Amino acid sequence: MRYLTAGESHGKQLTTIIEGVPSHLPITQEQINDSLRRRQGGHGRGKRMQIEKDTADMTGGIRHGYTLGSPISLVIHNDDFKHWTDIMGEDPFPEGKNIRRTVSRPRPGHADLNGGMKYGHRDLRNVLERSSARETAARVAAGAVAKVMLEELGIKVAGYVREIAGIVSPFDESMSIEERIEKSHASPVNTLDDETTEEMKKAIDDAKKDGDSIGGVAEVYVEGMPAGLGSYVQYDKKLDAKIGFSVMSINAFKGVEFGIGFEAAKRNGSEVHDEIGWDEERGYYRKTNRLGGFEGGMTTGMPIVVKGVMKPIPTLYKPLQSVDIESKEPFSASIERSDSCAVPAASVVMEHVVAFEIAKAISEEFPSDYFPRLKEALDNYREEVRNF
């Protein structure tokens, strides 16, 4: 499985093409749109989310509620395009028209300057339109298809916020995945603790008043994975490495860890590694899950627990200093519509990119042209490792 996305932040639409999804997977438009709605929510979002009402048009690869096995094409229309027609241009091949509102002032923390230098753009809008986090809507659409596949295979995925601006959400680690999903979906900051929710909301509001932004930590929890997915035989076959790559590719993410992650550097080995147990019902299991469901680049059968660190959004109402690429004069970076905190939305994005990597790993491990055959193969494998 793989996917590609196309489209600009203020262009007509975003497009996702997903290849390798098995045929005969039952799917509904509402399952995709529910994920897109969740990405748009969260306390601290900017005015753009009041304009966009993201829904996906399924334009290929699905018929009568089932996947065909051919590439799936999903289109998300940008409602804000109508406000940007003169700037973006309805016609990509205009004749004799001047380009309006060219951008020559790169913003610190964005791709503007580096992208302009790499691709030779003197109008930095050609960079910022594609590097915008708006593209994550297309990635969530791809991940939503993957989540449908995983749910049909008995694998559940939950994404939520663990920390915003140093405020850590405490919760019982034994909380079921159903509870994690329910609580996070009900929280305006996508976290699992009511008291912490209010503290986080206040921190977001305070940052907005100060013209500043704040970051945080998102966590994804995956249950139902059998042992042995991924591989130790080559570096690029390690599943935790693939998941880490996808998490780090999300806009503004600057760190990733599995299980206790960086905390392991402070502990003795006896406080890090997970002892092995066995019983007739489960087969082999780990008595703890400090390694987050991975050993040797492979799943252990324990829940996958992965965290991602999101930096504060760099578009500030306290503008940072930069330099105009034409005049070479210093200036204060321009203010665009922005979120004071996008960690709740980012946790939804992270949930879906992790889901896609897991679905991809399963499709590579088992026969994946025809979904009933894939499901049967995975069920047989689960029984095999249980009786190992």
Image: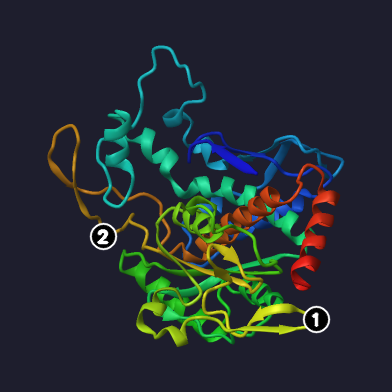
Quarter of the image holding residue 38? bottom right
Q: Are marks 2 and 1 in contact (CB under 8 Å)?
A: no
Going by the numbered disc 1, the residue's amino acid type is Glu
Query: Is any part of residue 162 visible from this angle?
Result: yes
**Residue under circle 2?**
318
Residue at 42 percent of width and 31 percent of height: 87
Circle on res. 45: none
Residue 135: x and y in percent read 51, 45
Q: Quadrant of the N terminus?
A: top right
Q: Nearer the viewer, residue 82 or 173?
A: 173
Residue 287: x and y in percent read 61, 85
Residue 52: x and y in percent read 57, 48
Going by the numbered disc 2, the residue's amino acid type is Lys
**Residue under circle 1?**
281
In this rendering, position of residue 375 left or right of residue 74: right
**Could you tell which of marks 2 and 1 lies nearer the N-terminus?**
1
**What is the crowding at mark 1: few (fewer than 14 residues within 10 Å), some, or many (at least 20)?**
few
In this rendering, position of residue 249 left or right of residue 355: left
Residue at 80 percent of width and 38 percent of height: 68
